Image (cartoon, rainbow, N blue to C red):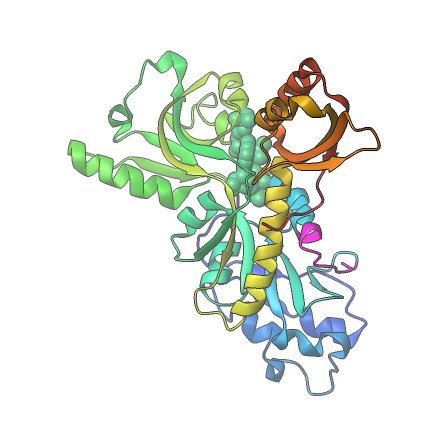
Amino acid sequence: MASNNGPIDIRIGTAPLANPAVAAVYQPLTTPFGSPPVESVTRNHSRVPSNTTFGDLSDLSDRLLFAVPKKGRLAELTLKFLEGADVQFNRKNRLDIALSTNLPVAVVFLPAADIPKYIADGNVDLGITGRDMIAEADVKLNEVLALGFGKCKLCVQVPIRSGIRDPKDLAGKRIVTSFENLAKKYFGELDSAVKSVSPTHIEYVSGSVEAACALGLADGIIDLVESGETMRAAGLVAIHTIIESETVLVSNPHTSKQPLIDKISNRIAGYVNAQRYYYCTYNAPKDRLKEFHRITPGKKAPTVTPLDDEDWVSVSAMVEKKSAAEIMDKLEIAGARDILLFALANTRV
Ligand SMILES: Nc1ncnc2c1ncn2[C@@H]1O[C@H](COP(=O)(O)OP(=O)(O)OP(=O)(O)O)[C@@H](O)[C@H]1O
Ligand SMILES: O=P(O)(O)OC[C@H]1O[C@H](OP(=O)(O)OP(=O)(O)O)[C@H](O)[C@@H]1O
């Protein structure tokens, strides 16, 4: 995770600068932690040399800017959500801004840790990132939708062999983390509560946090835990959860693009819903329909269609993925035949 310490000079993309339209967008930018903000570069044409033509990019200011993680574990899955919402775009090699070809949207690829601040400052309208990143950036955003992936906990961890099991026993000691602000807040309060003589020392590292204790750099760490495998492999144990996180769709509360945000978030909600269900269809003996109704009640009720055999009907219903195998077993035992399970591309409720 990137540090939020002070201005960092970044470039949205690197090359090629030969095309003046592209060069206009490739001005060196500063992050929202410095100035000028991205918006003034990408949307304010006065910063662009007068002989520059924007070409395809001239309408950027009319587009909804949609920030997505450019790398890391959220990046690939996030693209599936854009596909699910039918936000089509062509991303040119190494370009970090891609214009949608079917919606007035520009997709902006940014580090997940920077997305909350860009949205809060109005530099982009909509974005996908982790709740942990939003808490660390300490900004107020509209949470539009939880996306059902990237679930993890931010935990205080200590070496198992240290014997420490109460975070209060870390007051005044050394903590290493990528979540510097949350760590300072948590241990600041803890130091006051236990009236620690010296403040807990918080050290920022950008990755491989779990190595810090073994290397003698820390008495404890604050890091993300999902399966707990990384933690256990490093001989650590979690002694407190600071926040629970999940990947979320978030927007700027003052955006002028609300109608388009509603349209896109509705489509993404349909896609999220589709990930939870399968569509199940099977043939069932007509005289036992009540029993099948109980096994697959569907969202409202199962669809029952007559077959060219008066003793049998075709039944279809949505079933939750997590219990799909169990349901298929029950259907088969109850006498259903030709049981088929289909993945859903999208849904509307
Ligand atoms: N093990 C995990 N399980 C589930 N979600 C996770 C896990 N680790 C991280 N996340 C989520 O993914 C987000 C991005 O994590 P990632 O490690 O990809 O960070 P990054 O800084 O964007 O990328 P990189 O580590 O490659 O620099 C985290 O803020 C968190 O919301
Ligand atoms: O509980 P687990 O399932 O083991 O997942 C937790 C690990 O996942 C993340 O690291 P990541 O793999 O993204 O690498 P990083 O340490 O370089 O950020 C996080 O920082 C933990 O180290």
Q: Position of residue 52 (x, y in %)?
A: 73, 82
Identify which residue, 174 or 275, lies in the foreground. Answer: 275
Which residue is drawn at the image coordinates 65% and 80% (left, top)?
48
Residue furthest toward the left?
195
Identify which residue, 10 or 131, lies in the foreground. Answer: 131
Residue furthest toward the bottom?
50
Magenta stretch: dominant secondary structure: loop
Q: With respect to residue 83, does 310 lie above or below?
A: above
* Residue 137 visible in the snapshot: yes
Quarter of the rendered structure image containing ligand 1: top right
Q: With respect to residue 247, does 231 lie above or below?
A: above
Q: In this rendering, would 6 be left or right of 73? A: left
The answer to which image quadrant residue 316 occupies is: top right
Residue furthest toward the front?
310
Which residue is drawn at the image coordinates 25% and 30% (left, top)?
171
Which residue is drawn at the image coordinates 68% and 13% (left, top)?
333
* Residue 340 visible in the snapshot: no
Q: Position of residue 209 (x, y in %)?
A: 49, 31
Q: In this rendering, would 132 be left or right of 90? A: left
The answer to which image quadrant residue 185 occupies is: top left
Q: Position of residue 336 (x, y in %)?
A: 72, 20
Number of labels in the image equals: 0
The answer to which image quadrant residue 306 occupies is: top right
Q: Does residue 108 belong to the magenta stretch? A: no
Q: With respect to residue 182, does 232 lie above or below?
A: above
Q: With respect to residue 172, does 188 lie above or below?
A: below
Q: In this rendering, would 37 be left or right of 93? A: left
Q: Which residues are magenta?
A: 82-92
